[in-house]
């Protein structure tokens, strides 16, 4: 057995970003949509930098026109994740892409996603929970509609609220209303920060939004006081090394700060972000971390324990997941 065969928990994957190019192509074909600009000649997603990636992402997402498409997508990527050894995962799901922020439409999309997830759980032994996600560059106004959708559907399946998108637009604090609304509904909170934004965006995330997890957060390493603060507050980072390398945040795995963050006592977990966009899988992330830092079973066991602890689901679900992990 290699470390890549270990059972895994993944806390940071974008629902639409998990669509394999062949899946997106097939839907585009069925709907007679021209998405030729979205793909490279060899069948991957084509983008040149982060902002371009976000626009290609949105173009690819345009094939997901209704609940049925989201159900198909959910089944497809959960099967893939389970084949990579993932037994529990939380995905970012955006009302902006599921009915345009309309609460009635959102419920229909959510119902389709949940049904597909239940079937995948029965078939493949993988549990999905949803983190409703605002898209930062769509602005604070839209984020309020997203968090209202989140608040109205908070429960066993929708367990958190988060934000992705272009860190270059607006500030974390501009989204405080949406985060307060989600918090009041009992949702756990995360936001993308310290991926393309520097340490100040992570400071803003913990001070202005009071989140308990950070998507990426890796550029915190540039500020020793921030690293100390993350340790003191026990904030968990959802680290996606392969994504950071492909998007050019770091040149390669060996230069990635995940080991330094761990050494400093920061709680880190490992995820793929948008796996087909970044030519990665959870197996590959494990293999690359083993190669770059010599991580063995004990290291990955610590990462998985942190992920289970930081998962947004309830205690009963954690107990089920813990049992699955024992069977590694
Ligand atoms: N949306 C999808 N992937 C993302 C990423 N890596 N950063 C910010 N927003 C995203
Ligand atoms: Zn992300």
Image (spheres, rainbow, N blue to C red):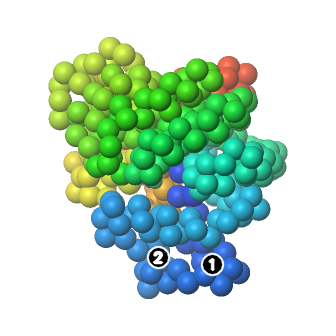
> Which quadrant of the structure image shows residue 325?
top right
Q: Position of residue 222 (x, y in %)?
A: 17, 35
Q: Position of residue 184 (x, y in %)?
A: 58, 20
Q: Which mark is residue 1?
A: none
Residue at 29% across, 49% down: 168
Q: Is mark 2 within 8 Å of ligand 1?
A: no
- Per the image, label 1 sits on a secondary structure element best described as helix
Q: Is residue 29 shown left or right of residue 56?
A: right
Residue 97 seen anywhere in this rendered image of the structure:
yes
Residue at 36% across, 16% down: 233
Query: Which comes sooner in the sequence, label 2 or label 1?
Result: 1
> Which quadrant of the structure image shows residue 208?
top left
Q: Residue furthest front?
A: 141
Residue at 42% across, 65% down: 55
Q: Position of residue 48 (x, y in %)?
A: 31, 70
The residue closer to the viewer here, 44 or 60, is 60
Q: Which mark is residue 28?
A: 1
The residue closer to the viewer here, 275 or 57, is 57
- Per the image, label 2 sits on a secondary structure element best described as helix
Q: Is mark 1 within 8 Å of ligand 1?
A: no
Quarter the C terminus occupies? top right
Q: Residue furthest top?
A: 232
* Residue 40 position (above or below residue 102): below
The residue that mark 2 highlights is: 38
Q: Is residue 233 shown left or right of residue 141?
A: left
> Which quadrant of the structure image shows residue 51?
bottom left
Dot 1 surroundings within 10 Å: few (below 14), some, or many (20 or more)?
some
Residue at 45% across, 24% down: 212
The residue closer to the viewer here, 55 or 229, is 55
């Amino acid at each position: 057995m290699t470390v890549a065969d270990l059972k895994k928990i993944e806390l940071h994957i974008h629902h639409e970003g998990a669509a394999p190019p062949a899946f997106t192509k097939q839907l585009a074909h069925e709907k007679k949509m021209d998405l030729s600009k979205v793909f490279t000649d060899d069948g991957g997603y084509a983008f040149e930098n982060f902002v371009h990636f976000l626009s290609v992402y949105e173009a690819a997402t345009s094939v997901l026109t209704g609940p049925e498409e989201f159900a198909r997508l959910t089944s497809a990527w959960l099967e893939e994740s389970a084949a990579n050894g993932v037994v529990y995962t939380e995905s970012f799901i955006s009302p902006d892409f599921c009915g345009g922020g309309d609460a009635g439409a959102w419920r229909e999309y959510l119902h389709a996603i949940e049904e597909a997830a239940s079937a995948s759980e029965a078939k493949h032994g993988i549990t999905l929970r949803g983190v409703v996600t605002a898209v930062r560059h769509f602005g604070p106004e839209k984020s309020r509609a997203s968090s209202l959708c989140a608040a109205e559907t908070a429960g066993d399946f929708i367990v958190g609220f988060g934000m992705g998108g272009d860190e270059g637009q607006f500030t974390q604090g501009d989204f405080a209303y949406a985060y307060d609304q989600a918090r009041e509904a009992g949702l756990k909170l995360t936001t993308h920060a310290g991926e393309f934004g520097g340490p100040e965006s992570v400071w803003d995330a913990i001070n202005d939004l009071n989140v308990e997890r950070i998507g990426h957060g890796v550029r915190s390493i540039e500020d020793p006081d921030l690293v100390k603060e993350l340790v003191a507050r026990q904030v968990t980072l959802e680290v996606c090394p392969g994504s950071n390398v492909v998007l050019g945040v770091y040149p390669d795995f060996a230069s990635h700060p995940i080991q330094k963050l761990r050494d400093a006592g920061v709680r880190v977990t490992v995820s793929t972000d948008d796996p087909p966009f970044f030519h990665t899988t959870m197996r590959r992330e494990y293999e690359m971390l083993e190669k770059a830092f010599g991580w063995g079973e004990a290291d990955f066991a610590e990462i998985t324990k942190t992920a289970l602890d930081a998962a947004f689901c309830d205690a009963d679900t954690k107990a089920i997941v813990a049992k699955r992990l024992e069977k590694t």
